[in-house]
Amino acid sequence: MDAVLEVTDLSVAFSVRGSGWRPSKVTVVDRVSLQIAPGEIVGLVGESGSGKSTTARAVLRLIPSTGDGRIVLLGRDITHTKDRELRTHRRHAQMVFQDPYSSLDPAMTVGGLLAEAIAIDGKKRSKAAVRARSVELLEQVGLDEAHIDRYPAEFSGGQRQRVAIARALAPRPQLIVCDEAVSALDVSTQRQIVQLLKKLRDETGVAILFIAHDLAVVRRIAERTLVMYCGQVVEEGRSRDLFSTPSHPYTLALLSAVPVPSPARQRARRRIVLSGDVPNPADPPTGCRFHPRCPFAFEPCAETEPPRTTTAGGTVRCHLHGTGRQLPWAVEDREVAGLERAPHSVEV
Ligand code: SF4
């Protein structure tokens, strides 16, 4: 089957009021392209403010996109689909948000929350059928019938997120977008939810777009990863390749901040500490948007925007690629991944 989701050159711009009379446009997502195959888990990572969540909302048409980008869901172009038709398509793509405290109505029981999600497809069902499906959903996410009459406040954060996932599964979607869905949870609960999502993918074949700022979490779940910086995808590739031999300095810097299990290796590892924050998209740097923070910046970086070029298993936006200059690989990550040591590394 073709891709579940195919996004080409998606841009999102917001109007902001500056000091002048006229509002100006700020492009917060800039020509993002991505594809997700049936049953695939794709990670989207980047710092806060990089445009990940805006991309997710635009992909699901929760906010409008700008420019001439395209969103194709299950072979159907939904970029400009009107409300009624959009509702039909939307049930094929569901979202799980970061905060289950605010995404679940506290006044409804779990049974009510699930019944509401089950009814999205508009089919008539008996009460008994709705209850049976609700129990099935609860069991799929590791809860059971005893939880059906309880309210969200009676659950832990992890359990609440399980309920949110059960709601997302209710209309039998082909795609679930998890927007920082484990970020508010403790590490052990994060692991459980990641395992649950993998299990659900294996059982149902649902594709998952997994958005997070934490690379360690994305590495555990995603088969392919996209790295965003200041509204652009700067690197994309198979997770195994991207985490062991990153092609973009920003990916390398993010990876160098991921703790490794061995305390001795953690002390010895080289860390690339990025100064400053993600730039304001209202006033992005010229040339490569990463150049003011990039420890490897060289002559063309401040002037010329790097094109998107293909790598062995993906794409990268960096002038280093193809110049013969090599980016030092993340030595420790190659070791963690069980690969041979990188040929060289540098102190930054
Ligand atoms: Fe760094 Fe230049 Fe590559 Fe941008 S294009 S990431 S500034 S080396």
Image (cartoon, rainbow, N blue to C red):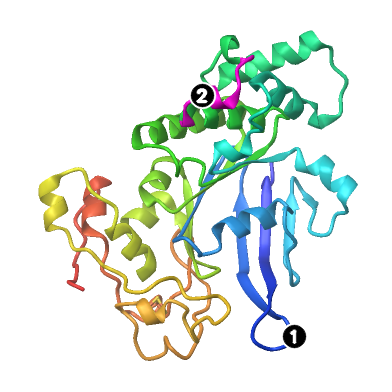
**Residue 25: x, y in percent?**
69, 78
The dominant secondary structure in magenta is loop
**Disc 2 target residue:** 155
Magenta segment, which residues? Answer: 148-157
Toward the viewer: 230 or 150?
150
What residue is disc 1 on?
Answer: 22
N-term-proximal mark, 1 vs 2: 1
Residue 125 in the image: x percent, y percent?
A: 84, 16
Please give left or right for residue 153 compared with residue 17 in the image. Answer: left
Residue at (70% x, 50% y) in the render = 60
Which residue does the image show at 57% across and 16% down from the upper left? 139
The type of residue carrying mark 2 is Phe
| Residue 36 drawn at (x, y percent) | 61, 48
Answer above or below: position of 206 versus 240: above
Instruction: Using the image as rendered, state which of residue 212 and residue 195 is in the foreground.
Output: 212
> Which image quadrant shows ligand 1?
bottom left
Q: Amino acid at mark 1?
A: Arg
The residue under the point 88% across, 53% down is 82
Q: Quadrant of the N terminus?
A: top right
Q: Note whether residue 202 is visible.
A: no
Determine whether the residue tagged by mark 2 lies in a helix, strand or loop. loop
Q: Quadrant of the C terminus?
A: bottom left
Taking the spot 21% from the left edge, 50% from the top edge, the residue there is 335
Give the vertical position of 88 relative to 230 (above or below): above
Q: CA distance from mark 1 to mark 2?
A: 48 Å
Q: Could you say which quadrant of the image residue 54 lies in?
A: bottom right
In this rendered view, identify the residue nearer to me: 280 or 51.
280
